Image: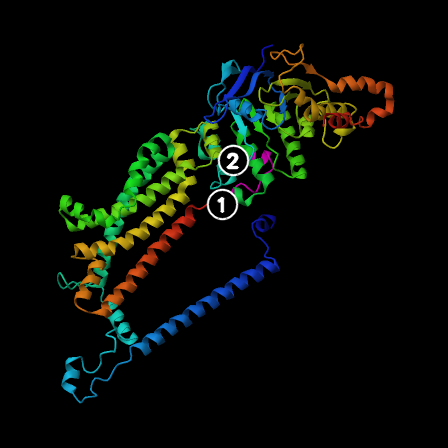
């Protein structure tokens, strides 16, 4: 089966007059299936946001291609909805008008009533009923980001791109919106590509977590298959025996292994065209069978030892 | 009931305290302003107390000098000033020929010139500023010209304008045009160039057309900055029109001031000065109100 989104040999070189040209990432290859929720995790400066901007059509790759739904991505399109890091709402427009701005672009010949009804539907979906006519300044951070999500969903894009959408929110609000996003994506079978720094968020939401090595010359080091059941919930997810193995694997990567990949000494078996697909959840779940009830306990924090060893 | 209470914000005690304090402090500030005004009037009155010219018994001379009513400094007393203001304001639109027109007519001439020159400048500066702000190339190409032309006093253009246009009224409008141009142009450029990238990216990803992007994203985003430029321009235009009309003569509040100076009527000069201040304040208030209309809170 051909993937819905295919990224091949993507690289981005930043040239500047003052310093050496910087190859932020190269040979980035991955694919996303229709209806799949993919997260990308990596340290700042590895070019995650640049990858997302290239997917959105806001930035151009130095080399490589992005093919979505059989067509090459060049320039922005209503087929890809973007939720920006700092919501990027227009402060002079009400919540409803912010959503309507995109809807009007998508369906220019809709009547006013149809447009309003469509916007209302998506504002209701993100739980903003009653706040439609408020300006962004009158909304809390979480509500602003909800408007941003409604705006991206309302154009009914083929793919949703989320650039660390919950980074600026408090933990409680973040949890609430994560639940809502998960619900909406499951209901609409939305294909999603999301950047996050939050390992728990990645495990809760995504089907596949791509781990990006440190820049410059960053690559997709590994793709982690999330083997937790699809109906996982925030309040019970940590009780699943697969949870901590996956979580530890991700944290381990971020804390120590991402560095090892940085100086371009990838293992010989590494093929950038096909980064290794790993299923840490299943590996330790097997061990868990031997350990019995102990599998419920968090695995010893292996990565801590390694941090000490490295420093 | 629920629907009703949703939009009603309960006022807490502290909010009420702040509100009432604001109210009473406004009231007190107003009272203080009145007191200062009273003090000024009192000092003015004392400074211009009439001097008795009849000491030497020369009542003939006193009569020649205005019936013993001249003041020590030649300046009017507050009461004379009040009478003059009343006289001018009770019949502002009379027209008795070239050198004797009502103050309303003179003001109308000045305001019309300012508005016309200002509007022409806005018609050029705002679209041009948009263009320059959106294109770094055009900005760099036009920057040397702007930097050279900006510091020129608008009045320095007057001889050139009179020579080429050969009409004093149009020349003064031209001078207003020139002086209003720069603040509006530079502020529009700045406002347009500094529209947040995020908003432009939103417009891009939502495939907004060029016109929708210009009118629905860039214009509202830059509007507060543009309006600040317009407000500065209007302030300068009102300063310059007085000087321009003193130069070209004929009509207008600037000409009125100069004419009354030639008539040695300090009362009328002071009256005109006060009126120039009042009109300038009013124009600024209008632009302040307009800026509040387009302001947004991030």
| Chain letter belonging to callout 1 | B
Residue A240 is situated, as x and y percent measured from the top left of the image, at 78, 26
Q: Is residue A128 magenta?
A: yes
Residue B119 is situated, as x and y percent measured from the top left of the image, at 28, 45
Query: B79 left or right of A63?
Result: left
Q: Quadrant of residue B102?
A: bottom left
| Chain letter belonging to callout 2 | A
Q: Which residue is mark 2?
A: A88
Q: Is residue A219 above or below residue B23?
A: above
Asked if badge 1 and badge 2 are on a common chain, one would say no
Point 25% across, 73% down: residue:
B75
Whether residue B240 can be seen here: yes
Q: Are the residues at dot 1 and dot 2 in contact (C-beta closer than 8 Å)?
A: no
Q: Residues under labels 1 and 2: Cα distance?
A: 13 Å
Q: Helix, strand or loop at disc 2?
A: loop
Is B60 in front, or is B173? B60
Q: Is residue A260 above or below residue B191?
A: above
Point 32% across, 36% down: residue:
B143
Q: Helix, strand or loop at disc 1?
A: loop
Q: Which residue is mark 1?
A: B297
Magenta-tinted stretch: A121-135
Whether residue B135 can be seen here: no
Point 67% across, 20% down: residue:
A260
């Amino acid at each position: 089966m051909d993937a819905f989104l295919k990224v091949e040999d993507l690289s981005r070189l930043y040239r500047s007059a003052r310093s050496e040209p910087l190859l932020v990432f190269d040979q980035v290859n991955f694919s996303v299936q229709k209806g799949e929720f993919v997260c990308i995790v990596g340290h700042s400066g590895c070019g995650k946001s640049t990858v997302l901007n290239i997917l959105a059509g806001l930035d151009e790759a130095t080399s490589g291609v992005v093919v979505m739904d059989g067509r090459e991505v060049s320039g922005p399109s209503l087929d890809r909805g973007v939720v920006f890091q700092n919501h990027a709402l227009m402060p002079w427009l009400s919540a409803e008008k912010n959503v309507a701005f995109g809807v009007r672009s998508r369906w220019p010949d809709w009547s006013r009533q149809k447009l309003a009804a469509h916007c209302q539907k998506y504002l209701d979906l993100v739980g903003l009923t009653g706040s439609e006519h408020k300006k962004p300044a009158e909304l809390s951070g979480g509500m602003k980001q909800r408007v941003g999500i409604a705006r991206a969903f309302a154009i009914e894009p083929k793919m949703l791109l989320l650039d660390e959408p919950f980074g600026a929110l408090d933990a409680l609000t973040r949890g609430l919106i994560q639940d809502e996003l998960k619900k909406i994506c499951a209901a609409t079978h939305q294909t999603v590509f999301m950047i996050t720094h939050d390992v728990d968020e990645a495990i809760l939401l995504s089907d596949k977590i791509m781990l990006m090595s440190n820049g410059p010359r960053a690559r997709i080091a590994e793709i982690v298959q999330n083997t937790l059941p699809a109906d996982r919930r925030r309040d019970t997810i940590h009780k699943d025996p697969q949870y901590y193995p996956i979580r530890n694997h991700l944290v381990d990567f971020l804390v120590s292994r991402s560095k090892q990949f940085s100086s371009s000494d990838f293992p010989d078996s590494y093929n950038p065209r096909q980064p290794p697909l790993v299923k840490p959840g299943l590996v330790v779940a097997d061990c868990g069978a031997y350990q019995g009830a102990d599998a419920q306990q968090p695995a010893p924090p292996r990565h801590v030892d390694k941090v000490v060893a490295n420093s | 009931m629920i629907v009703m209470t949703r939009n009603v914000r309960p006022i807490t005690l502290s909010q009420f305290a702040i509100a009432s304090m604001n109210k009473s402090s406004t009231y007190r500030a107003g009272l203080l302003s009145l007191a200062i005004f009273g003090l000024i009037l009192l000092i003015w009155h004392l400074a211009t107390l009439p001097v008795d010219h009849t000491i030497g018994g020369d009542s003939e001379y006193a009569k020649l000098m205005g019936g013993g009513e001249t003041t020590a400094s030649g300046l009017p007393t507050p009461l004379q000033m009040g009478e003059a203001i009343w006289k001018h304001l009770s019949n502002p639109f009379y027209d008795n020929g070239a050198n004797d027109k009502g103050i309303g007519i003179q003001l109308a001439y000045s305001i019309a010139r300012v508005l016309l020159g200002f509007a022409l400048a806005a018609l050029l500066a705002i679209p041009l500023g948009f263009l320059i702000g959106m294109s770094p190339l055009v900005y760099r190409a036009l920057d040397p010209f702007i930097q050279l032309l900006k510091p020129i006093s608008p009045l320095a253009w007057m001889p050139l304008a009179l020579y080429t246009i050969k009409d004093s009224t149009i020349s003064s409008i031209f001078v207003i045009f020139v002086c209003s141009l720069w603040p509006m142009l530079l502020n529009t450029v700045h406002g347009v160039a500094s529209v947040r990238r995020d908003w432009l990216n939103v417009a891009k990803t939502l495939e907004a057309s060029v016109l929708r992007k210009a009118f629905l994203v860039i214009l509202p985003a830059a509007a507060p900055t543009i309006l600040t430029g317009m407000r500065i321009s209007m302030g300068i235009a009102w300063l310059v029109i007085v000087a321009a009309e003193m130069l070209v003569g004929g009509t207008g509040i600037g000409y009125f001031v100069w004419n009354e100076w030639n008539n040695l009527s300090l009362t009328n000069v002071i009256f005109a000065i006060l009126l120039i201040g009042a009109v300038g304040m009013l124009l600024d208030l209008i632009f302040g109100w307009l800026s509040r209309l387009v302001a947004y809170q991030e």
